[in-house]
Image (cartoon, rainbow, N blue to C red):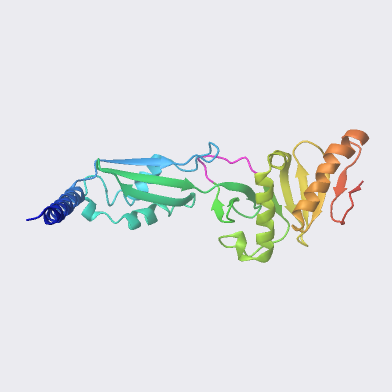
Amino acid sequence: MNRDIRTIVFFATSAIIMVVIIGFTSVKNTVKPVNNVLVEIRDQNGEYFTDQMEIVNLLNAENTDYVLGLSLDNLDLKLLESRVEINPFVKDAQIYRDIKGNLIVKVEQARPIARIYNPNGPDQYIDEDGRLLPVNAKHTARVPIVETERSFSWERSLVETDYGMDLLSMLNYIEKDEFWKAQIAQIVIEKDGQLKLLPQVTKQEILFGMPKGLEGKFRKLMVFYKEILPNKGWNTYSSVNLKFENQIVCE
C-alpha cells in the first residue's frame, strides 16, 4: 500500500470515527434530562413587566406539563416558545438546550412608549411596534399619556389604520429623542384627529395639528423653547401653534 492510499484510508477512517462520536454524543444528549431552567429577561431600561417565575409557569403550562426531568426527545421547543409568547409583554422568546442539561430561555420584552387613557374602560399601553398591551400591575412605565376625544377601531395594534401608523411614528419619534421624551407629558387626540401636546415643565399648550411633518414641527417647537421663551419669558404665552408651514404662532 503506497503512501497516498494510506493517507486516504487514514482520513476516511478518522471521518467515520468522528461521525460515530458525534452521533453517540447527540443520542446521549437527547436522553439527558433537563436539570434546570435558566431564564434571561433582557433589560428594557430597568423596567420588568414579567419575571422568571411567571416565565417558568408558562413553560410548565400553568403547572400541568412540567419540563424539568424531561429528555430532549420529549421537548417541543417551538411549543414552549409559543407558551411563553402568550404573555403580551413577551415580544420574542428563544429557547434552547445547553450541553449541561439546562434549558435556556431568552425573553425579549415589549417596550411601552405611551399609555392610552380610557375613561370608559381599562387603560392600555402602546409598545414600539404599535401593539396594544394591558396595564401591568407589576410595573408602571413612565411614558406619555394619550387621551383621545374620539373612538378608534384599533383591536390589537395602531398599525390597523393609517392614522394609527402616523400616531405611532410620532410616539416613536418622541421616545427616541431624550429631550422630547422628558418634555412631553400628555398627548390629546381631538375629535377631528388633530393633536394637542401638554409639556412636563412649561405651561403652554402645543397645537400640533395632524401627526405628520414631524421633523419640521418639532424643529419649530425647539426654536420656541430655545429662542422665544428665554427672550419673552416662560409664562408669557399660553399656547404655541405649529400647524402653519414655516410659522410659529404664539398666543
- Which quarter of the picture shows residue 156? bottom right
Q: Position of residue 103 (x, y in %)?
A: 30, 45
Q: Position of residue 207 (x, y in %)?
A: 82, 51
Q: Position of residue 98 (x, y in %)?
A: 29, 44
Q: Is residue 200 visible?
A: yes
Q: Is residue 204 visible?
A: no
Which residue occupies the foreground of this view, 124 or 33? Answer: 33
What residue occupies the far front of the structure in this picture? 2
Which residue occupies the foreground of this view, 191 or 120? Answer: 191
- Which quarter of the picture shows residue 9? bottom left
What residue occupies the far left of the structure in this picture? 1
Which residue occupies the foreground of this view, 18 or 236? Answer: 18
Magenta span contains residue 76: no
Magenta span contains residue 142: yes
Residue appearing at x 84%, y 37% in the figure: 226
Which residue occupies the foreground of this view, 246 or 189? Answer: 246
Q: Position of residue 221 (x, y in %)?
A: 82, 45
Residue appearing at x 91%, y 37% in the figure: 236
Per the rendered image, the range of residues in magenta is 136-143
